[in-house]
Image (cartoon, rainbow, N blue to C red):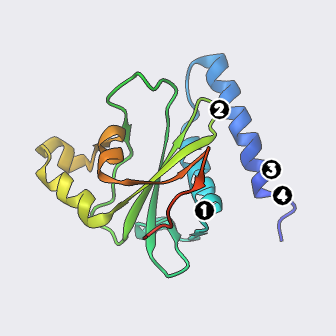
């Protein structure tokens, strides 16, 4: 058993990342994804996978494999924001996108099924297909809202 509380460490990471961005105008690399994975598991009842090299980050109670992506949105009016590369060649069942605000607090979570995402990527331009690139706006269209800060859990993952 660890002497550190992960929840407390994540709270400190949120504060540090916010303070760093305000002081330097830059973001801390990788912090959004760590917070997103933690929040997705806590808020959606997922189990984090210790070995995340297999293409998915968490499992549902029923064993569904979930890839988790996080994106900090500091300015909603700014368009063209992208999510990280989708691991299309690895095994996973759906992708969860966790949206974080300027304080690295989760405000919305979306889920999209693998097949829907891969169909869209296959129809995309060659450059997007190669990168597995997808905009946040497009993910919101393809996926479905499963959690909000105001309402909490709207729909079960895989529902």
Quarter of the image that includes the C terminus: bottom left
113 or 25, which is in the foreground? Answer: 113
Q: Do the residues labelled 2 and 4 touch (CB within 8 Å)?
A: no
Q: Which of marks 2 and 4 is nearer the N terminus?
A: 4
Under circle 3, the secondary element is helix
159 or 101, which is in the foreground? Answer: 159
State the CA–CA distance, disc 4 to disc 3: 8 Å
Quarter of the image that includes the N terminus: bottom right
Residue depicted at 52% across the width and 26% down the height = 74
Q: Earlier in the sequence, mark 2 or mark 1?
A: 1
Of tags 3 and 2, the one toward the viewer is: 2
Residue depicted at 73% across the width and 34% down the height = 15
The residue identified by callout 2 is 103
Residue depicted at 82% across the width and 57% down the height = 5
Q: In this view, does 132 lie to the left or right of 33?
A: left
Q: In this view, does 126 lie to the left or right of 69?
A: left
Under circle 2, the secondary element is loop
* Mark identifier at residue 8: 3
Residue 66 in the image: x percent, y percent?
45, 67
Under circle 1, the secondary element is helix
* Mark identifier at residue 159: none
Of tags 2 and 4, the one toward the viewer is: 2
State the CA–CA distance, disc 2 to disc 4: 22 Å
The residue identified by callout 4 is 4
The residue identified by callout 1 is 41
Q: Do the residues labelled 1 and 3 touch (CB within 8 Å)?
A: no
Q: Do the residues labelled 4 and 3 touch (CB within 8 Å)?
A: yes
Residue depicted at 40% across the width and 60% down the height = 95
Note whether 17 is above or below 45 in the view shown: above
State the CA–CA distance, disc 3 to disc 2: 15 Å
Q: Do the residues labelled 1 and 4 touch (CB within 8 Å)?
A: no
């Amino acid at each position: 058993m660890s002497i550190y509380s992960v929840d407390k460490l994540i709270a400190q990471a949120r504060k540090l990342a916010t303070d760093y961005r305000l002081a330097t105008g830059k973001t801390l690399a990788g912090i959004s994804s760590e917070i997103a994975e933690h929040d997705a598991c806590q808020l959606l009842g997922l189990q984090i996978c210790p070995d995340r090299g297999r293409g998915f980050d968490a499992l549902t109670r029923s064993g569904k494999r979930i890839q988790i992506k996080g994106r900090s949105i500091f300015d909603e009016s700014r368009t063209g924001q992208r999510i990280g590369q989708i691991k299309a060649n690895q095994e996973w069942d759906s992708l969860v996108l966790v949206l974080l605000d300027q304080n690295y607090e989760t405000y919305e979570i979306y889920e999209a099924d693998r097949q829907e995402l891969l169909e869209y990527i296959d129809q995309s331009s060659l450059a997007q297909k190669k990168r597995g690139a997808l905009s946040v706006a497009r993910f919101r269209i393809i996926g479905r809202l499963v959690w909000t800060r105001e309402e909490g859990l709207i729909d079960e993952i895989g529902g």
